[in-house]
Image (cartoon, helix red, strand yellow):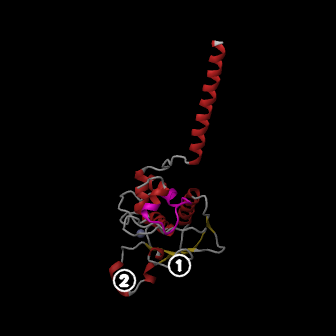
Amino acid sequence: MAQTRNLTENVFLLVLALLVSACSASQQDVSPPVEPKYSREAVDHAIQLMGLNEIGAKLRKRESNVRMVMFGAYTPADQRVVEETMEIFANASSSIQFEISPLGPNVRIHFIPLEQLWTDSEKRTRRGRILGICPLRMDDPDFRLASQIYIDKNLPNALRASSIRHYLFHMLGFGHTSAPNSMGNRARRGAATFSSLDRIAIQIFLEEDLKAGMGKEDVLRVLGFAQ
Ligand SMILES: [Zn+2]
């Protein structure tokens, strides 16, 4: 008799344990804990590149596919830099395609003497300081539809690759940062390539859940850093 009751109690306890574990499992399915995919350091770097540190700043980013065509006096080395950079962007995005294609370009990269674009007074003040121009950060309302990048064709080789990468960074929608090793550093000259934090920032920036128009708090929340 005592043995039977023990058995009944054990079966009851087993069923209870199964019920409890099933309940907690289904609760987990409903609201999984948000685990940040990125370090806070990487997110802060991205936030700065996105220009979201200013109060009221909104996220500007490309959300359409990017087809790029190159014009002017570019070298095979320039073309390789553009191709490699577009590949880095393409690998970081699951929703946007990046390609260099003469069909339906929405981004043009011109290799020309920049002095052609300047007025005489600009030539006096800017000579030797501007390596390229990417007008899309200049409050261009057609940001998503069209953009033009101008790289000075007279740049010495040591500056060409980093300048091209810097302006392709702007093409995505990135602004500047004071981080010394970043491709987004305005003062950086002749840098070899993107820093490791830059590469993570590219991935963060191209996350599908980050939408144009979001403020800093929305961006942090989406990335798992509740305010
Ligand atoms: Zn710049």
Q: Which residue in the rendered view is the most extreme toward the left? A: 125
Rendered location of residue 11, percent (x, y) = 65, 24
Rendered location of residue 71, percent (x, y) = 56, 75
Is residue 102 visible in the rendered structure shown here?
yes
Q: Would you say 176 lies left or right of 24 here?
A: left
Residue 209 in magenta? yes
Point out which mark residue 142 bears: 1
Marks 2 and 1, the one that precedes in the sequence: 2
> Residue 139 sits in which quadrant?
bottom left
The amino acid type of the residue labelled 1 equals: Asp
Residue toward you, 121 or 4: 4
What whole-number distance in Å separates the C-alpha atoms at marks 2 and 1?
Answer: 25 Å
The residue to which callout 2 is attached is 122
Rendered location of residue 52, percent (x, y) = 41, 65
> Residue 191 sits in which quadrant?
bottom left
Q: Which residues are magenta?
A: 201-218
